[in-house]
Image (cartoon, coloured by chain):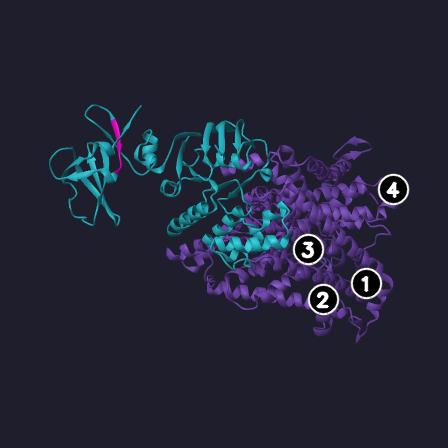
Amino acid sequence: MYLRLERLDKKFEATEAVRELSLDIERGEMLSLLGPSGCGKTTTLRMVGGFLRPDGGRIVLDGEDITALPPERRPTATVFQSYALFPHMTVLRNVIYGLKFRKIPREEALSAGRAMLEKVGLPGAGGKTIDQLSGGEQQRVALARALIVRPKVLLLDEPLSNLDAKLRVRMRGEIRRLQREFGITALYVTHDQEEALALSDRVAVMEGGRIVQTGAPQEVYGAAANGFVADFIGRSNILVLEDGSRVAVHPEDIRLSSGGEGIEGVVFDRQFKGAVVTWFVDTGGRTVEADVPGRSGDAWRTGERVRISFERESATILRE
Amino acid sequence: MALKQSSSAHSKGAFLPDASSVLYALLAGGVLVFILWPTVAILKESVLVDGAFSLERYRDLLTGNRTLLKNSLFIGWWTTVVAVSIGLCCALYVTRTSFRGKRAVLGVLLLTLIAPPFVSSLSYIMLFGRRGLVTWRLLGLRWNPYGAHGIVLMESVGLAAVAAFLIMAVLRGIDRSLEQASFDLGAGRWETLLRVTLPLARLGIVTAALIVFIRSLSDFGTPMFIGGNYNVLATQAYMTAMGSFDLPKAAAISTLLVVPAFFVFLVYRKLMAGAPLFSSKSVASGEERSLPGAVRWFVFAVVWSFVLFEAMKYGAIFCGAFVRTWGVDFSFTLHHLKTLQLTKLDSLLRSVRYAFAAALITGAMGVVLARFLGRRATLFSRAVDFIADLPFILPGPFFGIAYLLAFNRLPEAFLGTGFLIVANCVYRQLSLGIKSGVSVLGQINPELEDAVRDQGGGSLAVLRDVIGPLLAPAFLVSFINTFTFTMTTIGGIIFLITPYTKVLTAEMFDAIQSGDIGASSVMASVIILVAMTVNVTFSWLLLKRRTKGSEAEYVSSVGAAR
């Protein structure tokens, strides 16, 4: 294992932010820590970066125990949520900032900085000041600054949360491209499940300071370990079967029909979303959402009776 | 989510080297020795009669000096009413009208703010005195200029700038969309002004009024020069300390002046707690024609009368510096300037030296203390913060006499270095230094410090590369403010001046007292010129560094702070 977190504990006064958290990340892998706010994902990231000292447990990177090292001596680099670019320095000086602590001659640093700016898609922006850049450009500078010091692990703390929806989608592709290009190991913190699924090799879902499920995006999406994961990853309908067992079914796996087999319900609303239409069906007090592809927003009227069915293999059986 | 928690975990001092704890202890110790101890010393002196506790002096004061007390309150009340009215008009003019000439108004206000306080008295004598240019030469009046009316008039125009800047800062901070909402909901300009704008600015207006009130109470120069037989408490305190050397009595009189000051202090702290000096909050701006027509023209009239009056006031002084004998012989001469160069050059240089020293020390101490106080939320730190804030509001004579009592056992040779004068100015202005530091630090993204460490820099690199450069504006504001204050103040330091530490304001004070208008004018002009030069130069440095924010905004932030 390249990066190993062993039974990490962290308390802030009375609240336990992280509890007995263990996680292994392989070399060159991109792993997302995914969870709602307050689940301990940023705390975990900050412990890896060295900004927080764990109360218990160990962090081992490339065979070396780095638990007690201060951030400036760790081979990690962080892309901060606020980007944390130095407002009083130019773009280029921001990018090469870390190189001066690595005793790299200024000329060499400058040309490395320019080359890095080109790689992140900002050729010639070196002389600008930070406030002349757009949010997406600042994001690229932050990435350049973190990548140039060749860290063993790249840490990304909700890096896209300050961008608008369209840019977010584009930048997550960029981040993934750069991560692959540099072959760098990355730990990515986000609360956006779509983002986590789209850009990671593996996803670790967190709740209440613990990891509740780790796996490839398809696994986590298709076979949620429990109700929390099922509900948090994508939207899920929780249905109770005849035998009393509870299952989770994603809205796109629900079929609606006017007759035949299935659970009975009444359509009470619909939302047109472009690629799909989401139908809201009341099944005796429990709402079921069904995504039906196409633009046929008039297949049913509100108040109409429908039958709900799904394939057994698309349903995740929930224990507990 | 964890961001907040972790930065508080950060601030536990885990990464602060020990040297910084020593520095903090030294700076906090300084606050106790140079603010708390003198304050205790003067309070003690005022209640000790022959070594025993007694309130006898206060009883005597309240029974025997009824007239003085009444006079002080009378002057204070009317000065407050007039100065705040002018200040409010100026503030509305600059922030709520589309009239031209805002720069001129701001310029005159800034000039008033940085001119020595008793310059007003000098030009009053020159313009409206027995041989005054206006009253005698132009109108041929024979009247007695000395009395309460002159004091109120000159204190009001002198203090209007303080009120104007405070109210301006508050008016600027009001989200214009609230006013727009009021218009949108069908309210007229009158209703909006009276029910939205002014109520939102209420705290600023009240603070301005309280500050003007205590400044007026503690001003002894104006009543002394142009009050004639009209005597007030502050003058009495000065005379008692410097004339009859009855320090205990002077202590009691100036302590009496502190009572209203303390209430001001509480309101002031409340106000400043919510008003950053460097505002990053973006408030909706809007159309500026939001005042009712009648109010607009009233404001216009008041502001321009004030501006013209001030222009006349300073014009008289600058002219007075170059005419032979004001009121008698108006021929041009460089005589006064030469005399200054021959006899008062030492005092001038001393003033500049003290001002530079005080400004550097206050600037540096302010930002460093801001960093410490911002990071340690202990009871001790809160106490230090509170004590450091006190002198801002304490009347000058109180703080001066307090120093005299607290440090009178220091060796004479040491006093000759001007140490006490500089210390007095430093600690009177320290609170602004801390405030501008706290305000800037509060806006520094804590992740910037993390970024330095993440990139491989230690705590020294954090200071050198991030905190230092970003705190520079706070240092500059504090520097400019303290320089100007030290250069122009008299109320506090006049009690600490020895023959070896005479500064130019003290020379000027003596010259006015002995009626030497030429010498006084030339000294006043020089003081104004030096203070103006430093203000302009350093403000330019400050503005060059700031990418956002306008000149006017800066001026009002400095003005409000003072």
Colour purple belongs to chain: B
Q: Mark 1 vs mark 4: same chain? A: yes
Whether residue B153 is visible here, answered yes or no, is: no
Mark 3 residue element: helix
Callout in the foreground (3, 1): 3
CA gap, disc 3 and disc 4? 31 Å
Residue A41, image x and y in percent?
45, 35
Q: Nearer the viewer, residue B230 or B293?
A: B293
Q: Which chain does the residue under circle 1 lie in?
A: B
Q: Give the residue at mark 1.
A: B515
Chain A, chosen colour in render = cyan
Q: Which mark is residue B480?
A: 3
| Marks 2 and 3, the one that precedes in the sequence | 2
| Residue kind at label 2, given as amino acid type | Phe
- Residue range highlighted in magenta: A246-250
Residue B132, image x and y in percent?
74, 69
Q: Which mark is residue B128?
A: 2
Q: Residues within 10 Å of mark 4 (few under 14, many from 20)?
A: few
CA gap, disc 3 and disc 1? 32 Å
Magenta segment's dominant SS is strand
Mark 4 residue element: loop
Q: Nearer the viewer, residue A298 or B460?
A: B460
Callout in the foreground (1, 4): 4
Q: Residues within 10 Å of mark 3 (few under 14, many from 20)?
A: many
Q: Mark 2 vs mark 3: same chain? A: yes
Callout in the foreground (2, 3): 3
Would you say the residues marked 3 and 4 are in contact, meaning their CB atoms lie under 8 Å apart?
Answer: no
Quadrant of residue B46 within the rendered picture: top right
| Residue kind at label 4, given as amino acid type | Pro
| Marks 1 and 4, the one that precedes in the sequence | 4
| Residue kind at label 1, given as amino acid type | Gly
Q: Is residue B549 above or below residue A248?
A: below
